[in-house]
Image: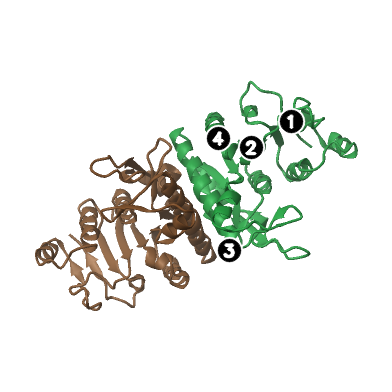
Chain colours: A brown, B green
Amino acid sequence: MPKEKLSIVKIGGNIIEDASALEAFLKLFSRLEGKKILVHGGGKRATHIASKLGIESQMVNGRRITDAETLEVITMVYAGLVNKNIVAQLQALRINSIGLTGADANSITSDKRPVKEVDFGFVGDVKSVDYNSVNKLIEADFTPVFCAITHDGKGQLLNTNADTITSQIAIGMSALYETSINYCFELNGVLEDINDKNSVIKHIDTKLYAELLEQGIIADGMLPKLENCFDALNNGVSSINMGNTSMLTQENDNFTTITL
Amino acid sequence: MPKEKLSIVKIGGNIIEDASALEAFLKLFSRLEGKKILVHGGGKRATHIASKLGIESQMVNGRRITDAETLEVITMVYAGLVNKNIVAQLQALRINSIGLTGADANSITSDKRPVKEVDFGFVGDVKSVDYNSVNKLIEADFTPVFCAITHDGKGQLLNTNADTITSQIAIGMSALYETSINYCFELNGVLEDINDKNSVIKHIDTKLYAELLEQGIIADGMLPKLENCFDALNNGVSSINMGNTSMLTQENDNFTTITL
């Protein structure tokens, strides 16, 4: 028997930080048919509030260090302010959502990243997704809305990359569902020419990915994103779309689909 | 057939703000047998963080006005910082909890308080509890952990009194369960003499309540608490205990039980 479909949609800071863009996105998301999960990043709001509170963001090699104070701010902003406002707005759109961190329903357990050259602080690398626990919520007709926070199972919350959370949830849920991911971001898709926003590569598979890597077309921020995608595809996820939010509608086919 | 029992436990700021008191309480809560729900207040942390962010708490007649900025802080602190740390700690104690506002699972809908002499801002008076929705979580073996935030069903979060949320959840759930409330607070119970912490009145019923009111023994902050209790009892809740957290154990019987 074929598995039922489950769509996992991830939105980033560019949408979170723009109230009207968020409202428009949530309308699209509410109309998406079938079972679904939303994952959101936190954006610059946490940095902004941290700085107002006099907490300086420590950066090492361009990556933020999550000390105890920064984790508090991230927990406030991601799990509180951003997550609960999204949930309230989805309820207004008649989507019965529940906002979650990985601690809620014991859904996502992480290991605190080991200290090597850099001590990233309270950052978690996903260890396991309790897909049965998440599925209890889905089966009860709730739509889970995850923020980018997990826990270590010993009482510690951990800051975790939202793209990784998305792919790990998708991998976990693929035990039960035919799972796809929609990564919504500020570009129309993976671009052949970074200076031409319309140069969307419509379909990337393993073979083309190798070629694009060799040609240096996939670089910088796109590299970890695509590595993350192929990791998900190699671990049970069916397909992944990357593009702007309008790819959730039927009208726009100008985005990137990634398959093995 | 007799209904199954459900315990609803409410803790206030005095426990939230003291890390070791919170840890000790959560251990007691985790050992409490049967189905249960936790409700927590927010305490002074929100005021503290608001003041750090340069947001002044406006008070009218001793009551806080929740303007848009204050609501943001309350959402960050109650639904983010406090709620998610409690959930993570309960997971460490093997209680599979889910942290909720009234927006999550559409569990508690409120009306924004009408403006009369005072505009309280984004404050909600509970209109309805979706006990079937909350029960789906309980039936799936999750322990709901509520913070004192509700929503209006139109996308707006609302600051709501934690004692009222507790009694309204208890009233709602009494359609399905034999529901009791444990209000944990800084006193050993309702005191006959406010200056003698051991003068606990062990049992208050409707008749004694009327007498205590007449004698002026119930006054000030205790008055709305007890009014709230009798409202709950008159609307289906079986019994209510008030006292310090040790009343959750079998060893302490020095607390107040309230029945009709």
- CB of mark 2 within 8 Å of CB of mark 4? no
**Between discs 4 and 3, the one toward the N terminus:** 4
Question: Quick check: do tags 1 and 2 share a chain?
Answer: yes
On residue B256, the disc is 1
Above or below residue A127? Residue A62 is below
Q: Secondary structure at mark 4?
A: helix
**Between discs 1 and 3, the one toward the N terminus:** 3
Chain letter for mark 3 = B
What kind of residue is marked 1? Thr
On residue B156, the disc is 3
Chain letter for mark 1 = B
Q: Is residue B91 visible?
A: yes
Above or below residue B166? Residue B56 is below
Q: Secondary structure at mark 2?
A: loop
What kind of residue is marked 2? Lys
x then y, percent, for residue B126: 67, 55
Residue at numbered disc 4: B22
Residue A34 shown left or right of residue B76 in the figure: left
Chain letter for mark 2 = B
What kind of residue is marked 4? Leu
